[in-house]
Structure formats: C-alpha cells, structure tokens
Image (tube, helix red, strand yellow):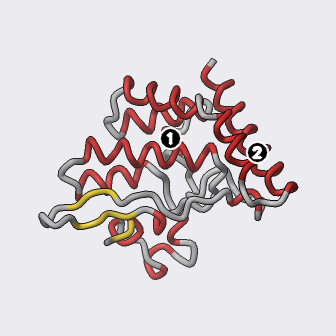
Amino acid sequence: MEDLAALTGRTQQTHGANYKYQGNYLEMFEALKKHLPAYRVEAVKLFKIILLNYLFSNGDAHFKNFSILETPMGDYRFSPAYDLVNSRIHVEDQTFALSEGLLPPHLALGNVVQHFRTLAEKAKIPVKIVDKEFKRFLGYSDKVQTLTEASFLDVKTKRSYLQHYQTRLSKFRRSME
C-alpha cells in the first residue's frame, strides 16, 4: 500500500509541516494516471469519495487518506475508502482538506458544482457518469436522515451532523440550478 502523499512526493522535508494538506485533488488524479492501469475505472471511485467527503463535511480528506494497493497480479488499484468522518462536528475546518481545494486556483472558477465538473473533465471522467453520480448522491438525503437518527450519536451531535450535511446538500443543489 502507498498513500498519495508518498506517490506525489509529499514529505515534511519537501512540503513543510502541513505537507499532506498542500495542493489540490486534481493532483491525486494525476498520480493515479501514472500508477494505475485501470485508471478510468479507479478515477470514478476517487471522484465519488471526494464528493462524499464534500457532502458529509470531511475536512480531513488529505493526501495520506487516499492510497493505492498492489493486487496479487502485481499491478495496482485504488484502495477502498478509509478515515471517512464528519470533521465539522468536532472542529471548524475548511470545506476541503487540501489548501487549494478541488482544483488549482486558475481552474477554480464558478460554484462548487462547476468545480466538481471541471475536476471530472480534467480527470477524464465522462459527463454521463458525473451526472449519474450527482443524481445518486443527491437522492440519498432521506436515508442519511434515517441512518443518522438511528445512530449512537447523542442528540446534539446528530443534529449537528444532519445540519452540516443538509447545508452542503442544499448548496450543491442550488449550484446545479
């Protein structure tokens, strides 16, 4: 297993104390292109995890929280998601963990949906797949509410969790109009 900080050459010596937070998510796709034979399939997985992290307020989705795994055949694939948390219920953090967000500043034009669409375009993810994933993620709000209410979180934390989720969901929906 190699995390994306290692794959992109990020260390404390090269990028400073906050090395795992420096950069943008497009750089992750560029690293996957170099190392994964099935990039087109694996890129969609990364895109979905980034979208999930956005909607569920995971402000700690940094380069060390994404990895590739060696398969028994000796090639590599994107690892299953891990360290998925709603960091907002604990700390007041940024929308995205990485310093530049989804994209380098010169590409980060428009609203959050436009940023995700540009990210997908640059990552060579077809529009049809992006639209399908947007629709799918936006259709889960009732299930999120039900599962959150059934969770073992205390009442105040459940309320905060749902409030953060619904705020991001609403912002995303408005950006699609």
Residue sitting at the far front: 150
- Quarter of the image for the C terminus: give it: top right
Whether pointer 2 and pointer 1 mark residues with C-beta atoms closer than 8 Å, the reply is: no
For mark 1, what is the residue?
106
Give above or below for 161 relative to 2: above
**Image quadrant of residue 99?**
bottom right
Amino acid on which the number 1 mark rests in the picture: His
Q: Is residue 127 left or right of residue 89?
A: left
Which residue position is annotated with label 2?
A: 162
Quarter of the picture holding the N terminus: bottom left
Which residue occupies 68% across, 24% down? 174
Could you tell me which residue is drawn at 67 percent across and 46 percent down? 147
Vertically, is 48 above or below 157? above
Please, what is the three-letter code of the amino acid marked with disc 2? Answer: Leu
Q: Is residue 38 left or right of residue 54?
A: left
| Residue at 67% from the left image edge and 56% from the top image edge | 86
Closest to the observer, 169 or 177: 169
Q: For the point 51% across and 71% down, which residue is it?
A: 19
Say which element carries label 1. Answer: helix
Q: Residue furthest top?
A: 177
